Amino acid sequence: MSAGPSVHLDTFKGNYAASSFLTKLTDQVLQVEGRTSPSKSSPSSKGSPAKDKRIPADPAAAVELLLSSFERAEKDLGKLQLQVDQRVQDLQQALAKEEQTFQVQIEVLEAHASDVQSSLLQMDTDIGQIGHSTRLGDRIQAAEAARKRAKNAGEVMTYLAEFASVSDFSELSELFQDDNRLAEAAAMTRQILALANEVMAAKERAGSSSTAVPSQSSRASQQGVAQAIDRLEDYRNLLEHRVVARFDSAVGSSDLGSMMACARIMAEFKRGETSLMQRYIATRAMFMDAKEVQFTEGRRAVDAAEAITAMRSLGGLYKNILAAVRDEAVVMEQVFPNPGPAMAMLIHRIFEQRIQAALDRLLVAPPLNAGPEAQQQHLKLLTEAYKRTLALSDSLQEIVREAADVQELAEESFGEHLADYPASELAWLQDLHNSTLGKWQVGRLAMEPVSQYCSWNAEAVERCATLSQEGSLPRHVRQLFVGPSPRQPHLGCLLDQVSAFLQAGLVGAGAQCNSTCSNPFSPATVGPVLNRSSAAKAAEKVIEIGMGSVLEAVGLASTIILAVRQHYLKVVEKRLQGSAPDAAACAAGLAGMVRATEERILTSLQVAITAFFAQVERTLTTEQKRVDFRPMAGMVLPLDQPTDACLLASSLIDALLRFASATLQATNLTSFCAEVGRKTHALLMTHMQHFSFSPAGALRWKRDVNEYTETLQVVRIQAIDEKMEELASMANMLVVAPDSLLGLVDSSMRISHRTALATIRLREDFRTAKVGSSTLAAIFSGD
C-alpha cells in the first residue's frame, strides 16, 4: 500500500479549488490500487481497461488506503500551516519595521514643511519692507531731482540777471569765457534764453489780462529781460562763430574728434548742426574740381562715336560720385549726431550742382532743322543717361537709406529733358517717314517700308518703357501707336504712317493703271505677228504695268495689315496693361485703319476695273471690223479662229485673271473675278449691239463668244457661266435660218419675242427675210 500523495505549498498556488484537490487525492489512491491487483480483474473488463484501474479489487483495502492518504494529507497540511504561520509572522514584523521607518520620514518632512512655511512668511514680511524702502527711495530720488532742478533754475536765473546787468562779455562768468567749456556755455545759453522768453511771454500775458496800468518797476523789469535776451542772442552768435571757426580748423586738419565735438556743441544752437553740415559739404572736393564738371562743355553727341565717349565721361563722373558718397557717409556717421540730414543735404547738392549740370551739358536738344539721325542719336543718349542715372540713384539709396528719396531726385533731374516726351519720339518718327517716303514709293507698295515703320515704332516703344514715369507708359505707347487723341494730328504714330503709305501706294498704283489703260491694246503692241502666244505675252506685260500694279498693291495691303496686327500683339499690347482706355483706343484705331484700308482697296479695285474695261472696250472698238461679222462678197472667213479683236481682248482678260490669282487672297480673288465676269458679259452684250451679222459672220461671232467663255472659265462661277451660255444662245438666233427662229425662241430658249427681237434685229436679213408672208419684224414685234 502506497503512502499516498504528498501535499506542499505549490498545490495551493494558481487556480486552486477544494473539489479538484480531493479528486486528485482519490484518483491517485485508486490508480495505485489498480496497479497492485491485476490478477483479480475479470475477463469482461478487457474492453475498458481505464475503468478497471479505478475500481480496486478489494473495497475495504481501498477505503483503508483513502484514509491513510487523507491522514498523510492532513499531516502535510499541518506542517504547511506552521510554515504559513511562520511566514505571516515574519511579514508582520517586517511591516512593523517599515511603518516605523515611514513614520520617522513623515515627521522629518513635516518639520521641513514647517520650516518652509516660516520662510515664506518671513519672505512676505521682507518683501513688504523692501516695497516700502523702494517707495521711499523713489521719493528721495524725486526730491533730489527737484532739488537739482531748483538749483539749476537758480543758476539760470543768476546767469540771466548777469546778462541783464553786464555791459561787456568780458564781465561774464568764467563759464562763458573758457574755450574748453564751450559745450557747457552753449547748453546754458540755450536754457537762459528759454527762461527769458518764458518770462517775457508771462509778463505779456499778465499785462494783456490786466486793466491796471503797469508800475514803473514792472516796466523796468520787463526792459531788463528784453535787454538780457538781446545780449544773449549776441553772445550766442559770438559763441557760434567760435565753434564754426574751430570746426573749420578741424576740417582742414581732418580731426574727426574735434569735428564731432563741434557738432555736439552746435546741436544746442537755433540752427543746430545745419550750418556745420553746409560748411563741411561745401569743402568737399567734388564741388571744387571745375575740370570734372566741364567734361561735355561745348560738345553735342551727333554720332555713335561721340555718344560713346560722352557716356564714358558720364559713367566716370557717376563712379567718382558714388565712391565719394561712400567715403563721406563714413565720416558723417562719426561726426554728426544725426547724420541723416547731412547725407540728404549732400545728395541734394550733388544732384543740383554735379548731376544736373552734367546732364544739361550732355543732353543738348538738336536744332529744329536737325535730321532724323541726329534726333535718334539724342533719344538714344537720353535713354542711356536716364538708365545710368537711375542705376546711380539705386546705389546711392542703399547708402543714405531713408535720409532722402534719391530716385525722386533722379527723376527731377530729367524733368526738363522729358517735359515734352513722347513728342520728341513722334517728331523723330515723322521726320523718318517724310525723308523716306519718296525713296520707297515708286508707284507700288512694298513690305520693306512697313517693316521699317514697325521697327522704328518698336524702338520708340522700348525707349518709352524706360523713360515713361510710373503710370504714364500706356498713354505714351498709345500716342506712338494711334496718336495723342482723335482730335489732334497723328503725325509720327505708326497707324498714321502706315495709313499714309497705303494711301499713297494705292493711289499711285491706280494712277499708273489709269495711265496704262488709256491706250488700246493693238496689234502694234503685240508685234509683227499676231497669234495666241504673242498676244498672251504682250497682254501679260500690259497687265503687269497697269492693272497688275493695283492688284499687287491690294495683295500687299492685306499683308501689310496683317504685319501691323502682329506688331500690335507682339510689341504694343503688352505695354498697355493696366489702362483699359488706352488699350481700347489702340484697338479701335487699328480697327479703324483696317476698315479705311479695305474701303480704299475696294475703291481702287473698282476704279481700276473700270479703267481696264474701258481699255478693253477701246480695243474692241478700234480693232473689231464690220467685215468680221458681215463680210463682203467673195470673202472667206476663218471660222475656226477668233477675230483679232477678240484675241486681243480675251488675252487681256485672261492675263488679268491669272495675275489676280497670283496676287489676291481667296475672298478678294472670288469677288474680283466675279466682277470681271459680270463686266465682261455686259461689255460683250453692248459690243454685239454695234454690229450687223450675216450667217457666216454670226458663226464667227459665236466663235468669239466661245473664246470669251473659255477665258472666263478660270473664274468657275456658276452665275457667270450661265450668263455666257445665254450669250451663246443669242448668237444662235443670228445663225439659224429665218424659219427656224420661232421654234428656237419659243421652244429652246423660251424667252419673250420682245427680248428676242433685240438680238434678231441684228441679223443682216432682218428687214428682207420672211417666214411665209410675214417679216421677222412682224413675227417678233409682239408676244
Image (cartoon, grey):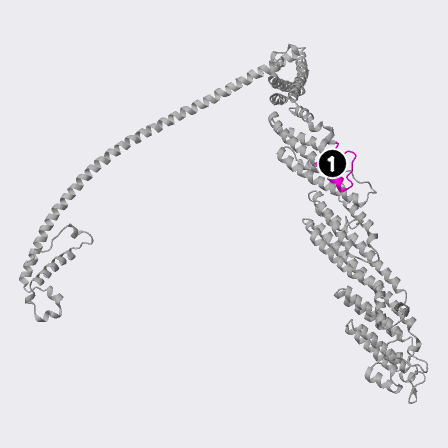
Compared across the picture, whether 291 is left or right of 368 comes to left
Query: How far from the left and from the top, in percent, is residue 661?
Result: 77, 67
- The magenta region covers 294-314
Is residue 295 within the magenta segment?
Answer: yes
Q: Nearer the viewer, residue 135 or 217?
A: 135
Q: Nearer the viewer, residue 236 or 616?
A: 616
Query: How far from the left and from the top, in percent, is residue 703?
Result: 85, 78
Residue at left 75%, top 52%?
454
Q: Circle 1: is it few (<14), some (14-19), or many (20+) Cα within 10 Å?
A: many
Q: Nearer the viewer, residue 774 or 685?
A: 685
Q: Nearer the viewer, residue 334 or 214?
A: 334
Residue 603 makes an appearance in the image:
no
Q: Eyeballing the image, is 642 above or below 408?
A: below
Image quarter where the N terminus lies is bottom left
Compared across the picture, whether 619 is left or right of 357 comes to right
Count of numbered circles on the image: 1
Image quarter where the C terminus lies is bottom right
Residue 102 makes an appearance in the image:
yes
Under mark 1, the amino acid is Leu
Query: How far from the left and from the top, in percent, is residue 664?
Result: 77, 64
For label 1, the SS is helix
Residue furthest toward the bottom?
Answer: 772
Query: How far from the left and from the top, in percent, is residue 357?
Result: 74, 33
Q: Which residue in the structure is indicated by mark 1?
A: 359
Residue 172 is drawn in which quadrant?
top right
Compared across the picture, whether 743 is left or right of 66 comes to right
Compared across the picture, whether 518 is left or right of 350 comes to right
Q: Eyeballing the image, is 578 above or below 160?
A: below
Residue at left 69%, top 53%?
570
Is residue 708 within the magenta segment?
Answer: no
Residue 449 is drawn in which quadrant?
bottom right
